[in-house]
Amino acid sequence: MSTLTLRRTPFVDAVLPGSGVVRDTLLIGGGTALTIVAAQVTIPWQPVPFTLQTLAVMFCGLAMGAKRGALSQMLYVAIGATGAPIFAQAGSGWHTMTGLTGGYILSFAVVATLLGFLAERGWTRTVWGTASAMAIGVALNLGLGAAWLSAFIGWKSAAVHGILPFLAPEALKAAIVIAALPAAWKFVRR
């Protein structure tokens, strides 16, 4: 069985059928804008703040598919890296990209790509599939972010400050997507 026969339509294509460069550009820009807004919903915490960024990142991948999800996050990172204050707590620039939270930010395109790939194979159509995809996304984001953070504060501190405090908030964000996406698919099928 080829990969093409396993491919399924991402949610956004089922809801907004069509194709073309303009449509894809608008969707990618919309995903970037969603991530920018989500990054501004912040609860200060040291060394890594709590934000809604990861909710937006994972939603973009799961709803738009691998290519558009990844491109939306690459655009987000590129805009922030050039100096626009769009990262959490109005962070921006190369110093943020190479600082304590750089690993989390750099993981966004990887996470969106992987979750988009899973969505294109039908994982978002069931609660268990969506839950599995979210668990993978959270683990990848926290793992890559903490690995980067450990270069600054060591592995033990990175786990204590860069993973453990985020488990409950990430579970809550995941629950939102787990409840919403399969339900939205059921609605679309009707």
Image: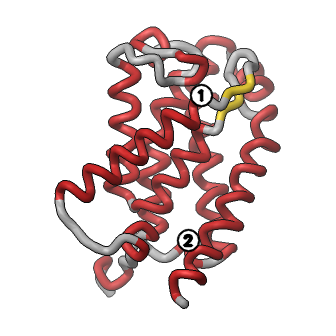
| Residue at x-position 76% and y-position 23% | 161
Q: Quadrant of residue 104?
A: top right
Horizontal relation, residue 92 to residue 126: left or right: left
The extreme left residue here reads 21
Crowd band around label 2 with a 10 angstrom C-alpha radius: few (<14), some (14–19), many (20+)? many
Q: Which residue was labeled with disc 2?
A: 124
Front tag of 2 and 1: 1
Please tell me whether residue 47 is drawn above or below residue 20 in the rendered image. above
Horizontal relation, residue 187 to residue 161: left or right: left
User: N-terminal of the two: label 2 or label 1?
Assistant: 1
Q: Position of residue 118 (x, y in %)?
A: 48, 66
Q: Position of residue 98 (x, y in %)?
A: 46, 15
Q: Which residue was labeled with disc 1?
A: 40
- Give the spatial CA distance, label 2 vs label 1: 27 Å
The quadrant of the rendering that contains the N terminus is bottom left
Please tell me whether residue 85 is drawn above or below residue 75 in the rendered image. above
Please tell me whether residue 87 is drawn above or below residue 91 in the rendered image. below
Q: Kindly state the secondary structure of the residue where label 1 is placed.
A: helix
The quadrant of the rendering that contains the C terminus is bottom right
| Residue at x-position 49% and y-position 76% | 122
Q: Quadrant of residue 125?
A: bottom right
Horizontal relation, residue 100 to residue 85: left or right: right
**Type of amino acid under label 1:** Gln
In this rendered view, identify the residue nearer to me: 140 or 127.
127
Q: Kindly state the secondary structure of the residue where label 2 is placed.
A: helix
Horizontal relation, residue 68 to residue 35: left or right: left
